[in-house]
């Protein structure tokens, strides 16, 4: 039935028609795709399933429940916002890749079996690559290659785990998995790579800053949040996720503070925010899982808003380093205003979306008597205010005046940023709009006096610390540099491994060439060429010796026989005699 058409094929098949359209019709079509898919999704209530038999297994292409709906709604919304944002960028490659990318994420979210899940998971990786390659720079091409290698490795881990898991369970149903066998650990790690866990995270700040201005909006919203959904679906209550999340919230702060590239700052900030979601999934209570889902929803909006504002800055100035920017509020006041709303939201100011979602995860940790975890999240909340709440708008739009006198962002970009900013405020003022669609009933009340006062104290003291550090000269200066992360392992370690392997393997190859190719093989070739003559000599030499024929020497009978064989000058009768002689010799030897 038409009301049960899954969103994924609407986006993916719809993307194939984009190059056939022109002008305003193409623009209208781009906006229509996510809107049409959203209304089709609205016609599919919780519990809807579309399935088919596949070699004795049940493939569930489309399965709707409350958890998948939360992510399905926000993925549709961000696809619409990103499409509006990209309207002035006339690139069919980016349009198609963005729609297929969003469709793949929706395919993962509404998959009801592991096979369908894996197919869309891999499509998510492949469809992201054009958003990097479309920038057509050396850095974006290198980032795309590394992105592919990392995610192919993660996909292979995931596939290996799924195959072993299906063999163990004799089922491909997608549901709670939990840790307990090599199969489950492989699936866990495969998902964790997409979630940018510590030591697997370098692909994210490596790739996102190299994407196109529109591609970065899609990428910041979909890859890691799809992994958040997958982990919430399959590993809720897995304790190790709490500690992974704590690490994710803490370490990116230090990199973001010293980073010069502002989109790279946002990339580290993204890892920090996903850490809150990991903690919520790891705690696994209804409040914590609601908090993780709500924070993913809110995060997609404000992070996309921040990436859009920085994309507008790149679009107008061609610059993104903090050392090259400043004073842009004079030329781009609306972009600066929207960026400040995004910065306030990510910092969890009251009356913004970040406040009503992040506080749920903090309360879940407090209710679970996890004092250290709560303190770590508190530290991370103060840190994100420093590097995204203050640093991004301050160095891009205020700080020193870099002298850029440019036009305001194009109208479509402002509209896209305005929509995202509107939702950041709407959810902060009316949190029930979001709470009503969360997986579990919500009794949490964010606007209590302790919540608001505590958060305002945290933010104001953080702002004071920033000002004092800046005035005292202690705050790290923005410098033109590349800050290496664990990518040092594959940048330097990979080159070292290549050198070692090249030396060892090339040495083995040289020895094999000398002794096998030019030694043994050459000898065998020479023997093979003279083999018939040598066999004949075994028979006729005794006859020659008895007859007194001269055998040795350059004109001896042996040399003449060899020359005759090499020139193929034997008559048919001579060849027959030699053949019979050889056969007789063999018979005598065998007897």
Image (spheres, rainbow, N blue to C red):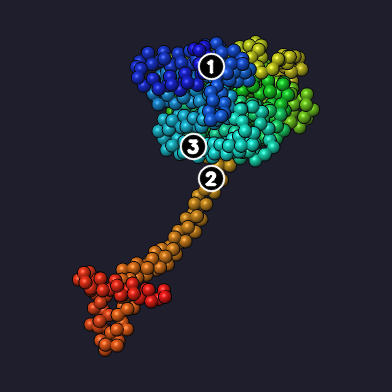
Q: Which of marks 2 and 1 is in front?
A: 1
* Neighbour tally class for label 2: few under 14, some 14-19, many 20 plus, Cα within 10 Å: few
Give the mark, 3 or 1, whose residue is nearer the N terminus.
1
Q: Name the residue under label 3.
A: 148
Would you identify the image quadrant in which residue 374 lies? Answer: top right
Is 200 situated left or right of 140 in this image? right
Q: Which residue is drawn at 59% across and 35% down?
A: 162
Q: Is mark 3 on a helix, strand or loop?
A: helix
Q: Nearer the viewer, residue 379 or 554?
A: 554
**What secondary structure is marked by label 2?**
helix
Depth check, front residue: 322 or 301: 301
Q: Name the residue under label 1.
A: 77
Q: Distance between the residues labelled 2 and 1?
A: 36 Å
| Residue 224 can be seen in this image | no
Which comes before the other along the chain, label 2 or label 1? 1
Along the line of sight, which residue is nearer the eye, 76 or 274?
Answer: 76
Examine the rendered structure and indicate whether residue 566 appears above or below residue 238. Answer: below
Circle 2 residue: 490
Task: List x then y, in percent, for residue 415.
Answer: 48, 14
Q: Which class describes the residues within 10 Å of circle 3: few (<14), some (14-19), or many (20+)? A: some
Q: What element carries label 1?
A: helix
């Amino acid at each position: 039935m038409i009301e049960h058409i899954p969103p994924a094929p609407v986006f993916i098949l719809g993307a194939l028609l984009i190059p056939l359209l022109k002008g305003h019709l193409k623009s209208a079509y781009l906006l229509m795709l996510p809107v049409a898919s959203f209304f089709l999704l609205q016609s599919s209530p919780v519990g809807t399933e579309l399935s088919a038999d596949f070699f004795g297994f049940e493939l569930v292409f489309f399965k709707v429940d409350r958890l998948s709906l939360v992510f399905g709604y926000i993925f549709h919304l961000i696809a619409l916002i990103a499409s509006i944002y990209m309207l002035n960028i006339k690139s069919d490659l980016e349009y198609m890749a963005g729609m297929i990318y969003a469709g793949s994420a929706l395919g993962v979210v509404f998959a009801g079996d592991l096979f369908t899940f894996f197919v869309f998971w891999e499509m998510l990786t492949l469809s992201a690559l054009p958003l990097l390659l479309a920038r057509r720079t050396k850095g974006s091409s290198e980032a795309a290659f590394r992105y592919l290698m990392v995610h192919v490795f993660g996909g292979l881990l995931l596939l290996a785990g799924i195959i072993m898991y299906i063999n163990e369970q004799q089922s491909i149903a997608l549901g709670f998995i939990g840790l307990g066998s090599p199969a489950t650990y492989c699936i866990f790690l495969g998902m964790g790579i997409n979630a940018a866990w510590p030591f697997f995270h370098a692909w994210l700040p490596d790739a996102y800053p190299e994407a196109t201005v529109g591609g970065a909006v899609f990428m910041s919203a979909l890859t890691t949040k799809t992994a958040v959904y997958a982990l919430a679906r399959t590993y809720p209550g897995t304790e190790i996720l709490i500690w992974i999340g704590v690490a994710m919230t803490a370490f990116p702060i230090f990199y973001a503070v010293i980073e010069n590239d502002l989109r790279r700052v946002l990339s580290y900030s993204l890892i920090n925010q996903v850490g809150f979601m990991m903690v919520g999934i790891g705690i696994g209570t209804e409040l914590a899982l609601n908090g993780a889902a709500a924070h993913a929803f809110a995060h997609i909006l404000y992070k996309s808003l921040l990436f859009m504002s920085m994309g507008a800055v790149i679009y107008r100035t061609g610059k993104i380093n903090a050392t090259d920017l400043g004073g842009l509020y004079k030329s781009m006041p609306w972009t600066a205003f929207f960026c400040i709303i995004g910065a306030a939201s990510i910092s969890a100011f009251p009356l913004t979306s970040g406040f009503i979602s992040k506080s749920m995860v903090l309360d879940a940790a407090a209710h679970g008597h996890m004092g250290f975890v709560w303190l770590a999240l508190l530290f991370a909340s103060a840190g994100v205010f420093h590097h995204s709440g203050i640093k991004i708008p301050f160095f891009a739009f205020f700080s020193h005046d870099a002298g850029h006198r440019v036009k305001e962002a194009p109208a479509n970009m402002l509209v896209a940023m305005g929509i995202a900013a509107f939702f950041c405020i709407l959810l902060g003022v009316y949190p029930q709009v979001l709470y009503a669609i969360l997986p579990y009933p919500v009794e949490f009340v964010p606007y209590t006096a302790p919540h608001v006062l505590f958060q305002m104290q945290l933010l104001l003291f953080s702002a004071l610390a920033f000002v004092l550090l800046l005035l005292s000269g202690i705050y790290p200066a923005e410098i033109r540099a590349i800050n290496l992360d664990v990518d040092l392992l594959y940048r330097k370690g990979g080159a070292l491994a290549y050198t070692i392997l090249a030396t060892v393997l090339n040495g083995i190859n040289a020895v094999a060439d000398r002794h096998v190719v030019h030694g043994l093989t050459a000898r065998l070739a020479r023997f093979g060429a003279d083999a018939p003559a040598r066999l004949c000599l075994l028979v006729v030499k005794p006859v020659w010796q008895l007859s007194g024929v001269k055998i040795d020497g350059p004109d001896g009978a042996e040399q003449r026989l060899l020359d005759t064989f090499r020139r193929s000058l034997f008559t048919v009768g001579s060849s027959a005699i030699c053949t019979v002689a050889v056969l007789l010799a063999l018979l005598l030897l065998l007897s």
